[in-house]
Image: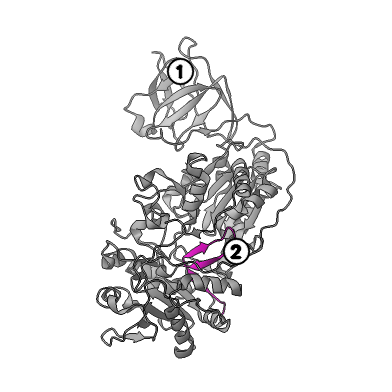
Amino acid sequence: MRGRRARDRAGEVGGAPEPPPSLPHPSVPPREGKRAGRQEAPLPPKFVGELGWSADGAARAPLSGPGSEVPVTASAGTVSRPPGPAAVCGDEGAAVSPGLVRRRGKPSPWKPVLTGPAAQVEKIFIKKLAKTHYEATPFAVSVVPEGAEDEAELPVLKKSEKNGTTSKISRELKEIVFIIQSQSNSFHSKRAEDLKRDILKQAADLGKELPTVLLIHEMDGHEGAWTILPLMRDFSVTYGRNSSWIFFCEEDTRIQVVKLLETLGRFDESKEWFLGKALYDEESTIIHHYAFAENPTVFKFPDFAAGWALSIPLVNKLAKKLKSEPLKSDFTIDLKHEIALYIWQKGEGPHLTPVPEFCTDDVNSYKVDHCATTFSNFLPLCGEPVKKEDVFVAVKTCRKFHGDRIPVVKQTWEREAALIEYYSDYADISIPTIDLGVPNTDRGHCGKTFAILERFLNHSSPRTPWLVIVDDDTLISIFRLRKLLSCYDPNEPVFLGERYGYGLGTGGYSYITGGGGMVFSRIAVQKLLASKCRCYSTDAPDDMVLGMCFSGLGIPITHSPLFHQARPMDYPKGYLSHQIPVSFHKHWNIDPVKVYFTWLAPSTEESLNGKKVGYNREDL
């Protein structure tokens, strides 16, 4: 569904709106970069211990201490172990390869250094020079854990330097450019600044040279900066000669700088690398235009929450491609998937290389000892949740859906709302609904939405600071939304939800997709209606027109990944695993009541501490 969106709004089934006209924005001016010498960056895995030879000629590898030995056999090119102790050690075998030390999979407690009779294998000496620096001649060991055959081979060991670990780390850190995928809203910009300070503080403890840390919302006032690709040429010009990596992360990503350096150090920075925590679709989905329909699991894309990295050679390649082939005017729906598709280039570019050290477990989890990154899995809460009476909920519907969609709302989330009204093309006192005098349309619902905005401003209590507009097939947690809104200032113009984009590569605007719910502060509604920006037709796509209007007013769209335009089954399980969702959308082929109580209904534990709880989330 390239270039169009599939919708099922109230009164609309499968219609795709014609996009409204795009708005121009200034191009990104290039900046000059300085030439600097490149450093040898990769840090090797920490091989410790020694593989010796027993009296009977069998090699033995220590496990965790003296006397803990596993017999292994050696031949002219391989080292293997019997299956018995493998479950304890974690690796099924190892192969000897000349020249390089390579390593696949997670770190293992089986850490051999080979010595042995020349008749069986040439002598190999791996000498520990520093905590993470080794030399190998003339052979080295490749450790291949069971099940790791599909993972990318990671080049590691390089000759160590004499200047010491700290100075080398300092230089390598200088060669990483950190890009925080930040937003201009005061709540989000503060969180991004906090992360920037934390990165620089860790860096200051390692050496004098600090890395570059950029906040993406501050980059040139570019409307489409959040989509990353329009900035590649700027990255190439500015950092293409004196950097090795561009590392991207979200404002809630937590980074262990030393572990990140060790992780990136495994990869040859002179090659093209696209690194991240891999996500994949278990079945083809509308939000990815049903890509790879025959087997969607084959295509991997990064979870931004864990952080992701591009080597400079790949950045330079992308910049060159963008110069000759500018991005087409199109929709941005799921950025992480679309970036991976663009880099892959139908097989001509690199696939995503999964990196196990890029994690989305909470920082306090027992699982994170090996992680270079973690993620905050808390629902944001900044003081007390906003009061029920401070949130006005408007439900868009039409007569033909009064009998099937509205009962779902009443069975699920209606009880969480103190102020709620249903707006339709027919007044039904049994619900009740309000006829706004706007006929139902088969496509967009711009006329109805603007009538709701007018009514909120002129008929609701002026003390009600927040308006939420949802479809009649939106499933939402008003309880969680009230907690989330505690972090936003209602005196600022706030337009909040799941962010999409239209034509951001060539001019255009961002917008909040309506199905997951659109949240407005009262002052945002006031500024919008005072501007006289209105629908170009009654059946125009309301969410896109709103995005165009707010863009023209200079009011930023505020994105929250907790709002969802589609159903839970349309998102990777790994992506939802570290979320506390606020909404989902559509009733297609699901039991919407079951989805609500599985994913969105508040629990006792959650209401007490705001943490993600272990719901029994079936395949819905």
Question: What amino acid is labelled 2 in the image?
Answer: Glu
In the depicted view, which residue is nearer to us: 292 or 456? 292
Q: Where is residue 593 in the image (x, y as percent from the top left)?
A: 27, 68
Q: In this view, does 494 lie above or below 287?
A: below
Q: State the count of labels.
A: 2
In the depicted view, which residue is nearer to us: 248 or 469? 469
CA distance for labels 1 and 2: 57 Å
Q: Is residue 189 above or below residue 259?
A: below
User: Looking at the figure, which quarter contains the N terminus?
Assistant: bottom left
Q: Position of residue 144 (x, y in %)?
A: 43, 30
Question: What amino acid is labelled 1 in the image?
Answer: Gly
Q: Are marks 1 and 2 in contact (CB under 8 Å)?
A: no
Q: Where residue 576 is drawn, which disc sits there?
A: none
Dot in front, 1 or 2: 2
Q: Where residue 223 is drawn, which disc sits there?
A: 2
Q: Quadrant of residue 460?
A: bottom left
Q: Where residue 77 is drawn, which disc sits there?
A: 1
Q: Is residue 502 above or below residue 361?
A: below
| In the image: residue 140, left or right of residue 129 | left
- At x 44% / y 67%, what residue is drawn? 17
Instruction: Please provide the residue range marked out in magenta.
Output: 491-512
| In the image: residue 426, left or right of residue 564 | left
- The colouring scheme, among rainbow, by chain, secondary structure or one colour, is one colour
| In the image: residue 260, left or right of residue 454 | right
Q: Position of residue 413 (x, y in %)?
A: 32, 74
The numbered mark, 1 or 2, whose residue comes first in the sequence reads 1
